[in-house]
Amino acid sequence: MSGLIGRTAVELAQALANREVSSREATQAHLDRIAAVDGSVHAFLHVDAEGALAAADAVDARRAAGEQLPTLAGVPVAVKDVLVTQGLPTTAGSRILQGWVPPYDATVVRKLRAAGLPILGKTNMDEFAMGSSTEHSAYGPTHNPWDLDRIPGGSGGGSAAALASYQAPLSIGSDTGGSIRQPAAVTGTVGVKPTYGGVSRYGVIALASSLDQVGPCARTVLDTALLHEVIGGHDPADSTSLAEPMPDIVGAARLGATGDLTGVRIGVVRELSGEGYQDGVRTRFEESLDLLRASGAEIVEVSCPNFPYALAAYYLILPSEASSNLARFDAMRYGLRVDDGAGTVERVMGATRAVGFGDEVKRRIILGTYALSAGYYDAYYGSAQKVRTLIQRDFDAAFTQVDVLVSPTAPTTAFRLGEKLDDPLAMYLNDVATIPANLAGVPGMSLPAGLAEDGLPVGFQILAPARADDRLYLVGAALETALESRWGGPLLSRVPNLTEVAR
Amino acid sequence: MSNHEVELMDFDQALEQFDPAFGIEVHVELNTNTKMFCGCPTDFGAEPNSQVCPVCLGLPGALPVVNAKAIESAIRLGLALNCSIAPSSRFARKNYFYPDVPKDYQISQYDEPIAFDGYLDVELDDGTVVRVEIERAHMEEDAGKNVHVGGATGRIQGAEYSLVDYNRGGIPLVEIVTRPVLGMGARTPEVARAYVATVRDLAKALGISDVRMEQGSLRADVNLSLRRKVADGEDQNAVPLGKRSETKNVNSLRAVERSIRHEVGRQAALLASGGSVTQETRHWHEDTAMTTPGRSKEEAEDYRYFPEPDLLPVAPSKEWIEELRATLPESPALRRHRLQESWGYSDLEMRDVVNAAAAELIEATVAAGATPASARKWWMGELARTANNDGVELADLAVTPDQVAELQGLVDSGRVNDQLARQVIEGVLAGEGSPGEVVAARGLEVVSDDGALLAAIDEALTAQPDVAAKIRDGKAQAAGAIVGAVMKATRGQADAARVRELVLKQFGLEG
């Protein structure tokens, strides 16, 4: 991709700092790209051209005045619609929040604004982040820029597709069971789920509070690190926010890019490979392991015996918390209100929720309500929490042997739109490799490992111990360097230029 | 049976057949400056929805942060209730849909309360001390307030629409739950009332709550059940407790007592006629002095409690707990005994003072220089009547203990008499200033200038020559009519004794 939109965030930041280009020019270039291609991709639910350009002008004025600005000042960003934005509509992909304009900013949004990143708009997602394909958005699916008939992953398909179609150099996602990493994998982009508590959840519309984590998405590992640095850190408004300072993730990404992993021990998770993984996914994964070995890393196999139970535990804990978190959408204070004229508050609540929520949301609310019910709590929610503890122990044990764990991010490449829409269990299985990290609160990254036999991107997942997010960037950057030197350039140089696609 | 046809058995008759057991949940609203989980102010009576933010409105994305001062208050209350303080306790979500609960769950505590296993010694009017066991005290956030518009009585029935004021939503509460209190027999209502009064006094002494029942900062839910009374010599506790009702909206000490008497009579009538008590929530109605059913417990909502994932466990250090223990005030019972002794009040007088929540006011008045007897006379007399007429608490009257002491000083020095003093109090209550200022402004000082009095006496004698003749004949008692006339002429400002003395002197009689 040529021109301003083809540049990485680091390149754009450099050009902005050197005053070769203004933030207005960079922002306008991305707005033009959105206007040109988002009709085909549908990565955005709301584009804020006016607000983005105003923010860009403010950065340009400050730079012209000689102010010292943060690294990414003036580089535009897209924000998943699960984060509340003051004055900008926020729906979380749900009809029940149609037209709601929040009166406050999420902490992450506040940090983006403070760092001078113009916000291009809000990206599409599965309703309330429930899904792996973005097909559960109440506003229609997002299309995968590699093949517009395929899913871009989910729930953060909009944020990933915006990157892969060069509509934004940076985007924000949220990851409850893989919603950053799986879309990154199937769109050939990079996404990181930070350590639980590493990025504030204040102002992030909750799906499952104990699993949700906001994270950075970009086209390169270094860009991802820079965005991570902007949004991370302690927030007194989030009680589960970590108090200690973040590790030096940008430094780790730069160090990793030198390609030397001597002394780094990498564990391949036995339970996250083999049966159920597409051949092309396995081949690309093995090749990446070879490259890591060639970079000096020691590769060993590690067993995490309780990982096979993660999916089942996840689908009890998530719906339980979600059933409570989504209770507030009751038509009393904001959002949709459906009044069937029966005149009681219960009827208005019921009618609104019947119309305002989609099938997948209803499915999980019902599951969670059941799992928390008196008489079932111990058997379901209680048992799931025990499994969660066992999975945390698996990670603890594994990290005594190795520095990072690796696996394919998703078992398959992007499937076709509609293919799994009527088979929730098949859809859930997409997240089998990403879910354990959420249950344990550990950080994870997905980066492109090449194209499978079907010509679609494959993701490589790296997992690190809690608070050691820097290891993701060290190993990720090294692998990226090795892969790009083999490919002779970034994987995304092979993505179709959508302006030439007739649709 | 409709609500208005509840059959009641006479209370004494009921107790011949049944043994009552009660338990009480008291909600104490803490007087922290800010709410439980956000920085919003907690002032009572503010403009509706003026003290709200994304957190206490439960807006999407908002997260709670625990108010450390509320934890401190809860621990101090727990310690004062002789409870153990949990080294680690957790918040839990209580899930239910209702418009005044903006998240449609209430953040409360469930299986891991901050304080548990305590007791409170409660002293009855006759000096008997009853130990009430405390099961637990836990923290939670208050709900908002529904305002029903268009109905006759502000109730939901018949209302055209309802509004919600979220100012109260998120104000910190501590809920204190007793174990069942057994074996109190006919004294059951009295013990229950004394328990709530003691909790009120304790929370007030701790300074953690305004404990105004009429403003809802102290609320009680009363559980009551009956079981068959056994014959002498049999073990009453071998009979299991009966099904209980939980009466809500019990918002005064008097209502605690009355609602229990009512429930005893109602349940006894049901059981005696072969019926059974439904385990249910009932509502106390102060106007009709009866309870009506709410939702029944059998079909009650399942609150689906689970640990609040947005908050970390509360883990107070041992050192902090001990620091807080050192801040506990003298217990209200000990304090009451100490004050009674130093003031020389009878048991009856002291009981009335305590029930009127006047002890602190009297203490301050005595500290400002009044004698205990005169302080009691004012607060339990003229001022108690005024408060009663206005339907407010003594402490809400626009008069301070210092002003009462000042007024008594004026009486003691003879500058005003009792009758004038009442007018001075009126002026103070009307906001006309201090007693001294009211005396000056209204010109209420006793007239002790003999010249002025003699002139008034002459006038009265001239006006009533027949009375003057009687006195001249030596009938001293006839002087009363002249004194009355002089008092009237001076609008009560004359010193009546001096007037009488002057009248008699004029006719050469001795007083």
Image: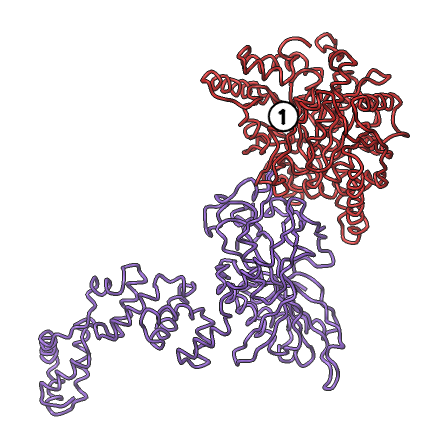
Q: Is residue B307 above or below residue A231?
A: below
Q: Residue at x 78, y 39 (%)?
A: A400
Count of numbered labels shown in the rendering: 1
Colour displayed for chain B in the image of the structure: purple
Q: Is residue B150 above or below residue B79?
A: above
Callout 1: SS: helix
A200 horizontally vs B364: left or right: right
Query: Residue A283's image quarter?
Result: top right
Q: In this rendering, does residue A451 appear at all?
A: yes
Residue A124 in percent (x, y) is at: 68, 25
Quarter of the image where the N terminus of chain A is located:
top right
Q: Residue furthest bottom?
A: B474
Residue B388 in percent (x, y) is at: 41, 67
Crowding near the residue tagged with mark 1, few <14, some 14–19, many ≥20 C-alpha atoms within 10 Å: many
Colour displayed for chain A in the image of the structure: red
Quarter of the image where the C terminus of chain A is located:
top right
- Chain name for mark 1: A
Q: Which residue is mark 1?
A: A227
B225 horizontally vs B401: left or right: right
Residue A379 in percent (x, y) is at: 82, 50
Q: Residue furthest right?
A: A275
Residue A20 in percent (x, y) is at: 55, 10
Q: Is residue B457 above or below residue A76?
A: below
